[in-house]
Image (cartoon, rainbow, N blue to C red):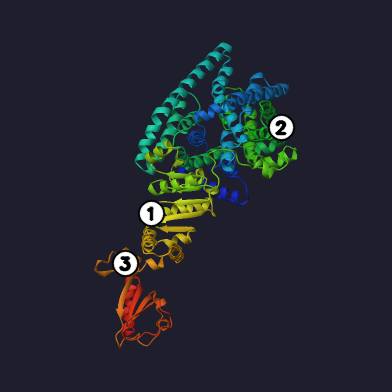
Amino acid sequence: MQSVLAQIFGLLLAAVVLVWLFKRIGLPPILAYLATGLLAGSHGIGWMAQSHEIHFVAELGIVFLLFSLGLEFSVGRLMAMRNIVFGLGTLQVIVTSIVFMLILLLMDLSLLSSFTIATLMALSSTAVVVKLLKETGELKQRRGQLAIGMLLFQDIAVVPLLITLPLLAQSSGTEGIAWALTFALTKGAFVCLLLWMIGKWVLPKVFSEVALMRTDELFVLTTLVVALFAAGLTYLFGLSMALGAFLAGMMLGESQYRHQLEADIRPFRDILMGLFFVTVGMQLDILYVFGVWYWIVAALALMLVLKIGVITFLAQLMGERKQDAIAAGIMLWQMGEFGFVLIALATKHQLLALDHASFLIAIAVMSMGLTPYLIESTPWLLKQLGVLKNPNGEWQQQPNSSTLYQNHVVICGFSRVGQTIARFLKPEAIEYVAVESNPILVQEAKAAGEPVIFGHVKQKDILKSAGVERARLVIITFTDFEHAQIVIDAIKQIAPDVKILVRMRDDSHLEALKELGVTEVVPETLEASLMLVSHVLSMSGVPMSRIVRRVSKERRNRYQFLHGFFAGDQFDSEENNAERLEYLHVMALPENAFAVAKNINELNLEKRKVSVRALRRKDREIDSPSLHTILLAGDILVLQGKPRRVERVECYLLDGTD
């Protein structure tokens, strides 16, 4: 047990160090995970032995990745992409397999070996491509949609391949293979129908009930259980776990909980995906690579040219733009993670020689490692080919989508205050989106056509879903200071320059919020007092222009005029309030007082954080007396400050002691 813990600790430590190092020098984290596996595996230092358990846990990373991908694709959206998935995807797998098979037959490989290797090379890495598309924000671009559509069909195509390869090794004949494939497709259709029924009628009710509990832990736990249940169900029927997770995510993609589900699953997905890439790196024999490096380089170059060429030709044949077709080809040129499973299966049934298997593993790992560079360099490559004339403008444009908000207002919290704000924004044609964690409120608001997202605004993924980085203003409508701090910090990490308006009960946290970068703080109780005063002055005959100036001045002075009050005998002596609030205290100066014959500046009251708000001398009242005013016996002073400070200053003014 201690040995296993030491291995896991070493693996995590190496991953942390290498991910940090690779990010410092501008390399993608995927390469850091591959390097970690290379060091840890039997072909490296060898402190981490490969095991079935580790690979199974690593596959959960793909499960969660496909679950989050399914959340992006509702049934309606998938049907809209059916031409890409079942049209372009089918052609890509078939044509690519035929091209590679012909080349391998010319190299004197057997028919079965050529078929096996060709089908392996026709598949691409869902894990690498989807992760990179999410990081670069290209998932909703047309080139990203083409890549995802073909990847979805490839994941479906893995199922018949897992059945066909063992049957080919047993030479069961065409009838046996046809019957097995028919049976597999029937099972797949049954499982898909079962998951669709569960996702349509059961899961929305489950998550509605869980959301009503308003417990983050329960929501996260339910999300994990649903993803693993769907994956386990398809695995039980001999299908891909990733396919089940994708279907479950797709069913929930139509629900109001989509954004929160994705935010909850992401930490587990990213950690387990890192572990998956570590296990991929463990399979690379670096000494073998050095021995046949020239053949590996030639094979990588051939695969790069052929797969990009085939995908580009087929995509253009179906009416896609040349730049999107080439970009999709660059995304899908590598071998995929399911290739490792198929290689192991083919080796077990003697469809592949051991040296061929090692060669394919080396190609798979190296092609995965090179993919981030090629995707990042796609605009430059297209420019060199003359396809793009202005990469910065033409390539980086945002997709036209009604869900992509721009120059809008984000309302954090859609209760009474949030809804009131929305009602005033709508007539002015100011676009807005609200984020709310009350499922009933979200359901009612969405039914009324309001743009509301279910989720917790403290999570950065939810804020990104609301387009905070493109917003003109973010409004925090709840008054919990601790919660507001977390949300403000998350907002500033995504959009450092966005304007933030915060609602608070009073101005006790005003300075702290300003330091956090808040643009404006609206203290509810003080603003209510200002509105009341405005009405009083207006009804008393004061001109409106003068009222507006007075109110604006008070806001600029941060409500200083509203802070002092006479406590009387009903003063709230609660410790928090006593330390937080200022109040007014009246005192008279007797003839022998220490402060008599001294000016206010000489007494240095500012150092004691107490001010003289007013002075009454005989029948004359002086508001905010000058610092050079000399105090006389019989003067009545109105002091303003916190209770304890005022008490100390009163003693000081009387006898000169602090």
Q: Residues within 10 Å of mark 1 (few under 14, many from 20)?
A: few
Q: Residue at x 60, y 48 (%)?
A: 22
Q: Amino acid at mark 1?
A: Asp
Q: Which mark is residue 578?
A: 3
Residue 117: image location, x then y, percent:
64, 25
Going by the picture, which residue comes out furthest to the front? 541
Badge 3 marks a residue whose secondary structure is: helix
User: Looking at the image, is 221 positioned above or below residue 229?
Assistant: below
- Tell me the crowding category of disc 3: few under 14, some 14 to 19, or many 20 or more residues within 10 angstroms, Cα based: some
- Tell me the SS state at disc 1: loop
Q: CA distance from mark 1 to mark 3?
A: 20 Å
| Residue identifier under label 1 | 480
Query: How far, Cα to Cα, is label 3 from label 2?
Result: 76 Å
**Disc 2 marks which residue?**
305
Nearer to us in this view, 8 or 368: 368
Residue 69, percent from left and from top:
52, 35
Query: Which numbered tag is attached to residue 167?
Result: none
Name the front one of labels 2 and 1.
1
Quarter assignment of residue 196: top left
The answer to whether residue 658 shows anywhere in this view is no
- Disc 2 to disc 1, how far (Cα)? 58 Å
